[in-house]
Image (cartoon, helix red, strand yellow):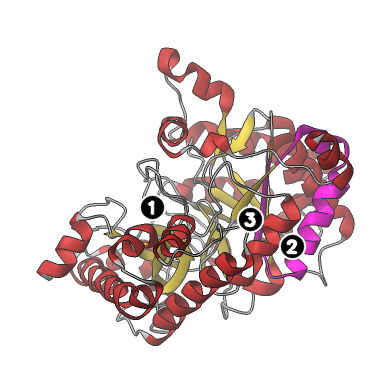
Amino acid sequence: MSAATQQAKDNNLICDMYEGHAPFKPRYVLPDYQLFLQQGSKYLELEPAQDFDDALNNLMILYHFVPSVTNIPVFIGHLDQLLMPYVGELSEEQIYSKLKRFWIMLDRVLPDAFMHANIGPSDNIVCRTILKIDAELAQIAPNLSLLFDTEKTPESLLLQACENIATTSKPHIVNHNMHKQKYAEKGYGVVSCYNVLPVAGGCNTLVRVNLKGVAEQANSITDFMQVQLPLYCQAAYELIEARCQFLHKDSNFFDHFLVQEGILDEKRFAPMFGIYGMAECINTLLSKEQLQGHYGEDQNANALALEITQLVAKIVDQTEVPYGYHGRALLHSQGGLNSDVDVTPGIRIEYGTEPDPITHLMSLAPQHQYFTSGVSEILTLEPTVRGNPQAIQQLCKGAFNHGIGIFTANVATNDLVRITGYMVRMSDINKLSEQGSRTNTTALADGAIKSTHVSQRQPRVVSHEFNHWQNK
C-alpha cells in the first residue's frame, strides 16, 4: 500500500475487517451445491446423490471443506431447491424426521450463527418443513432467509415465515424481485448476516469506508462530497486490489478442488465495497453546516444520505477491478463489528433513536436499490405483535413495494434475537461469563452489546392506537 492508504487504514478511515495482510481464502464462499449433488466429487470420493439421505449426507460432508472468514461455511445452499429432486416417495413425516435430525446436526457440528440457509421463493414441502422445524428448535444456527417473489410465493408461505419471526426472529425475508435481476446464470445466495453474492463464487475480500470518520475530516458538505469521500474511496480500492492480488495470484486458493471440479468459479468472486457510519456521517455534516435535522427523522437528512449513497454507487459502478463480478466490486452496507464504538452499522438509524416502523422503513428504502451485495435494517417490534403476525406480513409487503431489499425484524423479549444480523440467544449471553458457550458467536454478541449499544434498539409498535396510548 501507499503511505497515504496505510495511514487511512491506521486511522480507521478504511478497514480490512482485521483479517490480516495475507488472505489465503475468500471471505465468503458460495459453492454450487446443485452441481455437486448432481456430479459428486472425485476429490471426496463421492458418487452423485441418488436419494434424500444421500443428498443430506453429501452436503454435510462438503460443508467441512467450504472455507470462509469463520472457517465454517457461511452458505449451505438453497436447501429446498437442492433437496426437492430427491424427495421421491417420502411421506411428510419422513421428510420432517430426516430434516429435523439434519437441522440439529448443523447446529451442533457447525455452531456458528453466520452459517446461512436459503429457502423459497417457490412453495414446497421442504420449504414448509424447514420453517416448521426452525420454529420448533429455535437454534441460533443456521441463519435463514426466505426469498419472496410476488409471482411465485403464496401469501400463506409468507405468513408462516412471519409467524416464525414473531417467536424466533427468523427468517430474513428477501425481496427476490429486486435481487434476481442483478445476478445472471447461477443466481445469488444470501449468506452470513445479509450479504447477497453470486452462487458458485462469493466475496474475495471486504473493505469498508468509515463514513463517520470521513465526515470528521471534511470542513463542509461540499468538501466531503467532492474531495474527502472520493479520496478515501480511492484508498479503499488500493487496499482491495492489494488483497485480491495476493489471494488470486499468490495464495493458491484457486487451485482448490472446489474450483477444479467446477463447484466454484473464480470469475464469480468479487470484492465487497462496504460503507458504515452513515447516521453519524449525516449528523456530523449537518452540524458543520449549522443545519437542522437528524438521520432517520428529517427529510433533508435522509436526502443527504441518499445523495451520499448515490455518489458511492457511482464510484463503484465506474471503477474497474481486476478480480470483480463483471469487473466491478459490489456495494455493501456493512453490518458492523463488535469493536465499532460510537458508530452505527451500514446505513442504519442510530440505535435508540428509531422512529415508528413505517417511518423507519420509508426513510431507508430509497437507498436499498444501490447495494448490490446487500443492505439490511433490523426492526425491533414490541411483543404484542406475536398475536398479530399479519401486521409483520403487511409491513414486509409494504417495505418491498417501496424498495426495501431485505426485511428483518426482532421481537422484543424473544430469547432468540439478531445482533448485527447473526442470531444469538440472550439466555446464552447471560450465562457466558460463568459457563462459556458452545457457539462461536455468543462472545461476539456479548461484545457488541457492551460496546456498540445494539441492545438499545427501541421496540416499536405498528398501530397508531397503541402508539397514542404509549404517549399518553
* Dot 3 crowding, Cα within 10 Å, few <14, some 14–19, many 20+: many
Residue that lies at the very extreme toward the left in this rendered image:
3
Image: magenta residue range: 381-410
Q: CA distance from mark 2 to mark 1?
A: 31 Å
Residue that lies at the very extreme toward the front in this rendered image:
290
User: Mark 2 touching mark 3, by CB under 8 A?
Assistant: no
Q: Which residue is mark 1?
A: 68
Q: Amino acid at mark 1?
A: Ser
Let me know if residue 312 is in the magenta part: no
- x 68%, y 46%: residue: 409
- x 51%, y 61%: residue: 40
Nearest the eye: 4 or 26: 4
Q: Position of residue 36 (x, y in %)?
A: 52, 62
Q: Amino acid at mark 3?
A: Asn
Precedes in sequence: disc 2 or disc 3: 3
Vertical arrangement, residue 258 with respect to residue 164, above or below: below
Nearest the eye: 300 or 243: 300
Q: Position of residue 176 (x, y in %)?
A: 69, 68
Q: Report which quarter residue 364 is drawn in.
A: bottom right
Q: Which residue is mark 2?
A: 399
User: Mark 2 touching mark 1, by CB under 8 A?
Assistant: no
* Residue 168 left/right relative to 443: right
Q: Which residue is mark 3?
A: 118
Vertical arrangement, residue 36 with respect to residue 223, above or below: above
Q: Position of residue 159 (x, y in %)?
A: 85, 50
Q: Amino acid at mark 2?
A: Ala
